[in-house]
Every structure is written in structure tokens, then in C-alpha cells.
Amino acid sequence: MLKIAVFVSGRGSNLKSVFNKVPKEKLRICAVVSDKQDSAALGFAVDNKIQVYLVSEKIKEGFVDYNFLLNEFKKTSIDLIVLAGFLKKIPDSFVDSFENRIINIHPALLPNYGGKGMYGLNVHKAVFENNETVSGATVHFVDKIYDNGKIISREKIDISDCKNPVEIAERVLKIEHELLPFVVEKFADGKIKIVNEEVSILE
């Protein structure tokens, strides 16, 4: 069984999609981590008896730091960390400790429309303003540079009839809700392999 921790900043719709779509016998969500006390995802975690942590690089009441998380994750033998709408950059030392074991879902077709500041509606505004007819979602490994890690899987969608960035966001989110559980389940099945720096998904 794959043990994962999911990092979120907002409502947690991708967390819910993983929770609901990956078979329970393959996956255990051991922790939900957020940088925001008012993240709606935390309520979902509590309702489903999942351990919750608030994380900050700065000392704040009610929050833990990344070293604390690292020790907790080692105790519980976390296999994979899933960034599902987490808006903070993960510290380099934490990335080093989980090399090729942190993945992120990005609401665009990387390597386009990635990098610092490219999150949420900012991405979809850029896509819309460039008159793109296709967008989508990307799941990639996390390294020390924003949206730079090896791409695991991408899914495209036609947005040629979208009238504004919000419509693009809604359409892309539906793709995210399919792509992220697919990739997480492939990890659970041991079907994600890295050979010569190339990522492959086995059938």
C-alpha cells in the first residue's frame, strides 16, 4: 500500500479526487499539510480522520516547520508527497530528502506557463491572453526550481471556445481531477519508472 502526504493551500478538490478515485486497498493518505489555517481541505481531512499539519518556514503559533514534517514522515514511512494546489515553494533540503518522491499537479501544459507566479488563475489568464486554443494539466516531479522537474504525464483539452480565464480554469480542473488520481494509482502499482532521466509509465 502506498502511503502519501498531500499538501494543499485551498479547497482541496484534487485531494478529494485522489481520496475518492484511487482504490482504498492501494492507497493510504496519512497526512494533509497546508500553509493556510483556513484551507477548506483541512476540514475534509479532519472529517476523514486524516492527520493534519500546518506548515511554515517561519515560526508561527500552531504551525510546524519542514524539519518537523520530515521527521514525522520518516516515522510513518511516507512513500510519496503529492502537491495538490500547494502554493509555497518546498525548501531545497526537504526536496533532497524526498528526491523523486514529490510530485505536483500544474494547471497548464508544462514546460509552458510554469515558473514563479504561475499558479491558479494567473496561469489561465496568461493562457487566455496568448489566445491559446489548447491547455491542460501536467503532473511532474518536484525539484528545486518552480515547475521544472521531470514530467510524468500531461493531458490536453480544447479551450478554443472558452470566453475567459475562469472558463479555462473550470475546464482544466476537470482534467486535473482525472490525471492526478491516475498518476498516484500508477505510483501505487509501481508503474512509474525513471530510466536515464526519462520517466515512463508502464501499462
Image (cartoon, grey):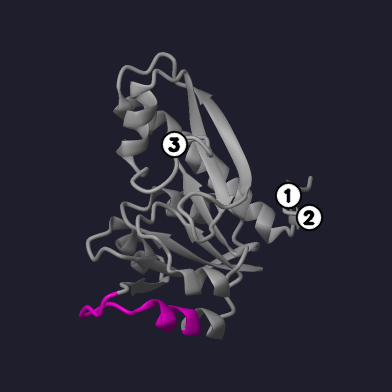
The residue type indicated by label 3 comes to Tyr
Q: Which numbered disc, 3 or 2, marks the residue that appears first in the sequence? A: 3
43 and 76: which is toward the camera: 76
Report whether 122 appears left or right of 51.
Answer: left
Report whether 6 appears left or right of 166.
Answer: right
56 and 5: which is toward the camera: 56
Assess whether residue 157 is covered by the magenta stretch.
no
Q: Residues within 10 Å of mark 2 (few under 14, many from 20)?
A: few
Q: Are marks 1 and 2 in contact (CB under 8 Å)?
A: yes
Query: From the viewer's perspective, is residue 191 above or below residue 34?
Result: above
Question: Which label number is shown at residue 195?
Answer: 2
Note whether residue 30 is visible.
no
Query: From the viewer's perspective, is residue 176 above or below residue 195?
Result: above
The residue type indicated by label 1 comes to Glu
The image quadrant where one finds the N terminus is bottom right
Q: Residues within 10 Å of mark 3 (few under 14, many from 20)?
A: many
Question: Which label number is shown at residue 198?
Answer: 1
Question: Which label number is shown at residue 113?
Answer: 3
Residue at (43% x, 69% y) in the render: 91
Question: Where in the figure is residue 121, as x and y percent of width and height?
Answer: 31, 37
Question: Which label number is shown at residue 85?
Answer: none
Residue 132 is drawn in which quadrant?
A: top left
* Residue at the extreme top: 161
Query: From the viewer's perspective, is residue 198 above or below residue 156?
Result: below
Measure how far apart labels 1 and 2 are at the Cα level: 5 Å
Residue at (22% x, 61% y) in the render: 38
Measure how far apart labels 3 and 2 are at the Cα level: 26 Å
Note whether residue 112 is visible.
yes
The residue type indicated by label 2 comes to Val
Assess whether residue 64 is covered by the magenta stretch.
yes
What range is drawn magenta here?
Answer: 58-71
